[in-house]
Image (cartoon, rainbow, N blue to C red):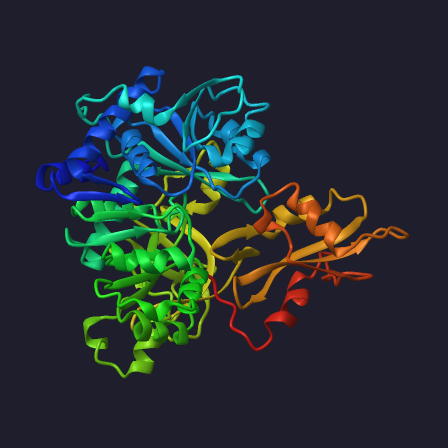
Amino acid sequence: MHLNQSLLRALALFPEKEAIADGQKKFTYKELGQRVSALIEALREIGLGKGSVIACLAPNGHEYLELYYATSFMAAVINPLNIRISPNEIRDILNDCSADAVVVHTDYANEIAEALKGNSTVKNVLWLGPGSLPTLQVKSHKLEPFLLGKWGASLPEPVAVSEDLAQLYYTSGTTGQAKGVMLTQDNAATNAFGAIAELGLNDGDVWLHVAPMFHLVDAWAVWAITWVGGKHVFLPQFSAQSVLPTLERENVTMTALVPTMLTSLLNSHNVWEYSYASLRFILTAGSPVAPELVRQVFEVFRCDYAQFYGMTETSPFLTISLPKAKMKNLPEHKLLDVKSKTGRPFLCVEVKVVRPDGSEVDANGEEVGEIIARGPNITPGYWNKPDITKETIRDGWIHTGDLAVMDKHGYINIVDRKKDMIITGGENVYSTEVEYVLYEHPAVFECAVFGVPDDRWGESVKAVVVTHASMEVTEKEIIDFVKNKLAHYKAPKSVEFMKELPKTGSGKIYKKGLRDKYWQGLAKKIR
């Protein structure tokens, strides 16, 4: 199974149906097919083909969807880049994956110009958006006229097979170095098929791409919605004032959000101005959602809700909080409890919660174990990192590092994690990565970074610092230092100074002891 089957099906069954609504731009599936065909020819002209790595640094838009499909038909590899990471981080990724080309929006011209310094693999930059272009040492092309110059090209026969690499997403590692998660054609296609079945997707669905398309909270819908002949609606970035009228104007039926987005919508001053008559489902992922927030979804939007859990490594679905048929008549508070759980296993994937010896925990909602999973949606591994791959995927099972309980109905609920990962506003931040930067500051002697509760972001990054004797530094100086080296969302929101950090018997910094006082009385849950 390969991803191109989704567009081929839509072209055969729905050629005159509207496929794209991106601001004032509207395209049918026939027109989408023509644009993808022309883009493939344009990319081939500059020497790209099977196995080429093409990075993308851009906000949401129809061009992103077209690039996903063009690379798939060519059996090239798309490398979506987080628009919030620093030029240094972009450079590291481009070098690590030996990217051949970058598609970039002019909003990020300065970032890509800086990132390309010291990069020797990228030969072409293709530009989206208005404005003048920076002077680069590589070839530059305005993508739209470049594409239109190939208008009339025929959609080629797909050359990709199921095991071909299709996507390469970089996630931060516990060592501070980003890891390239490889997803094959079959990984992503299996996930899309599962979503179609689980969510009952059909050609009447209208999907709003508002969570970032460089992230799998949203990107899986590129394939699933196209496969059923649904409509794609795009917003370049999230704001409540743009999302709410778009839901109404475009008759949106479904979308996926990180919980901070959902909170912003529910708290918007004009949320009651619209009817949301077409909206049938809101999904969230990235961090837990309280039952009260789920209740507000029902009250305000009058639609169904589910949260899903997974990883980039799992394409992304592992569980979804859809109730079983017999549960749908439960009292409201019990139904809210079900929908607020991490969820039951998703179609096409096996999920277990296991003890350290590999045996399954008792399904009593109390015994804690690690979530492991296997199935056709699981990554074959990390780009050029066989040792980390072997450590993470053992005997065919991916070990998530997330700790959870399972109840008697087979529903999982995450309670903690092995890794000190912080999820702030749906973005993953690894404490070690921030600590390594802090140790570069001349005043820092010891430090610890961890997540603390945050009403807006779910968690925020906190640093505790011990300075060298006689050296002084302010909280702002520490925060600014990290912001200059990493994406701003990774920088601490607060810094506490201590004379000494608590240690374990072996002399290690006792981070749990630092963190627990902030979480006292709260259940710390992930995703």
Q: Residue at x 34, y 71 (%)?
A: 272
- x and y percentages locating residue 174 in the rendered image: 57, 47
Position above or below: 409 against 184: below
Number of marks in the rendered image: 0
What residue is at 37 percent from the left and 42 percent from the top? 379
From the image, which quarter does the C terminus lie in? bottom left
Task: Report if residue 169 is visible in the image.
Answer: yes
Q: Quadrant of the N terminus?
A: top left
Task: Name the residue furthest bottom.
Answer: 331
The percent position of residue 181, horizontal first and vertical second, equals 42, 40
19 left or right, relative to 367: left
From what the image shows, is residue 201 above or below residue 304?
Answer: above
Tell me where residue 247 appears, x and y as whole percent: 29, 58
Q: Residue furthest left?
A: 13
Please say if 277 is above or below 179. below
Direction right: furthest residue: 470
Nearer-the-camera pick, 194 or 209: 209
Nearer to me, 508 or 427:
427
Picture coordinates of residue 398, whole percent (x, y): 40, 49
Left or right, residue 445 beside residue 247:
right
Horizontal relation, residue 257 to residue 442: left or right: left
| Residue 49 in sight | no
Residue at position x 22%, y 59% from top?
199
